[in-house]
Image (cartoon, helix red, strand yellow):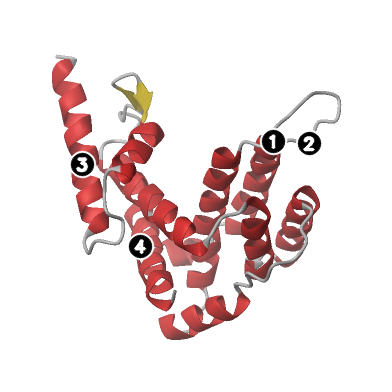
C-alpha cells in the first residue's frame, strides 16, 4: 500500500503541475470540488424516494476516484515529507468491516469537508467500504483516470480542441476497455496505457480523414 500511495501522490503532483506549474501557490479550493462530486455521487447511488432507483456502482466508483484526485491534492498541499504523508494516509485509511449507511455516510463526509476544508481520509475509506471498493481497485482506477487526464491535456483539452468521443465511444469507455486488456501490476503500466490510448485516438483521427 505504501508504494501505491507514493506512486499516486507523485502522479497527482505531476498532473497538477501539468495544469499549473505553480499550483501550490494558487491555493485552489480542492474541498469545493470534493463536495460537488459528493452530490453527483449521491445522484448515481440514488436517493429519490418517489421513483425506482438502483445504485450505479460503476459511476459511484468513478466519482470516488475523482474525489480521491482532489483529496490527494489537499494532502500534497501540506509541507510534510512524502514519507510522512504516506504514513498518515495509511493510518487514516480504515477498512474495518463496519455497518454502513452509504447515503448518510456521503452526507457526513461532505459536511466534514465543508467544515474543515480538508480531506477526511477515514470518511472516504468508509465510503469505499460502503460501495465495496478495495484499495487495489482504487489504485487501478486512479492510475487509469490520471493517465486519461494527462492524455486529454496533451491532446488539446485545455484549448478546447480535444475530441472526447471517438470511434462512437467516450474516452472513459476506451479507457475501461484498454485496462481490461493490460496487466495492471506490470512495471510501466501507466506508460503502456498511455501508448494504447494514443494509438486508438490516432487511428480514429486517421479514419475520419
Q: Residue furthest right?
A: 50
- Which of pointers 1 and 4 lies earlier in the amino acid sequence? 4
Report the residue at 76% width, 58% height from top: 100
Q: Is residue 153 something that shows in the picture?
A: no
Distance between mark 2 and mark 4 Cα atoms:
34 Å
Report the residue at 25% width, 48% height from top: 193
Which mark lies nearer to you, 2 or 4? 2
Q: Nearer the viewer, residue 120 or 133?
A: 133
Contact? badges 4 and 3 (CB < 8 Å): no
Q: Which residue is mark 4?
A: 11
Distance between mark 1 and mark 4 Cα atoms:
29 Å
With 135 as the anchor, is 124 left or right in this view? right
With 48 as the anchor, is 90 left or right in this view? left
Q: Which residue is mark 1?
A: 43
Q: Quadrant of residue 201?
A: top left
- Which of pointers 2 and 4 lies earlier in the amino acid sequence? 4
Q: Residues within 10 Å of mark 2 (few under 14, many from 20)?
A: some
| Position of residue 87 measured from the top left corner of the image (x, y, whole percent) | 51, 83
Q: Which residue is mark 3?
A: 196
Distance between mark 1 and mark 2 Cα atoms:
7 Å
Identify the secondary structure beneath mark 1. Answer: helix
With 80 as the anchor, is 12 left or right in this view? left
Mark linked to residue 47: 2
| Position of residue 180 measured from the top left corner of the image (x, y, whole percent) | 33, 43
Amino acid at each position: 500500500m505504501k508504494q501505491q500511495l507514493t506512486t499516486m501522490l507523485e502522479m497527482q503532483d505531476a498532473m497538477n503541475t501539468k495544469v499549473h506549474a505553480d499550483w501550490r501557490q494558487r491555493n485552489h479550493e480542492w474541498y469545493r470540488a470534493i463536495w460537488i462530486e459528493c452530490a453527483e455521487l449521491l445522484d448515481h447511488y440514488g436517493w429519490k424516494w418517489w421513483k425506482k432507483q438502483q445504485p450505479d456502482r460503476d459511476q459511484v466508483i468513478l466519482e470516488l476516484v475523482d474525489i480521491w484526485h482532489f483529496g490527494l491534492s489537499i494532502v500534497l498541499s501540506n509541507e510534510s515529507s512524502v514519507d510522512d504523508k504516506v504514513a498518515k494516509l495509511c493510518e487514516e485509511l480504515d477498512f474495518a468491516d463496519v455497518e454502513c449507511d452509504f447515503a448518510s455516510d456521503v452526507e457526513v463526509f461532505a459536511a466534514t469537508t465543508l467544515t474543515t476544508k480538508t480531506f477526511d481520509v477515514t470518511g472516504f475509506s468508509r465510503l469505499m467500504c460502503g460501495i465495496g471498493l478495495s484499495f487495489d481497485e482504487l489504485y487501478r482506477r486512479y492510475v487509469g483516470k490520471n493517465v486519461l487526464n494527462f492524455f486529454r491535456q496533451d491532446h488539446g483539452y485545455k484549448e478546447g480542441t480535444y475530441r472526447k468521443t471517438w470511434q462512437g465511444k467516450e474516452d472513459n469507455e476506451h479507457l475501461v476497455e484498454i485496462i481490461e486488456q493490460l496487466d495492471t501490476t506490470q512495471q510501466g503500466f501507466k506508460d503502456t496505457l498511455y501508448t494504447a490510448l494514443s494509438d486508438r485516438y490516432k487511428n480514429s483521427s486517421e479514419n475520419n480523414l
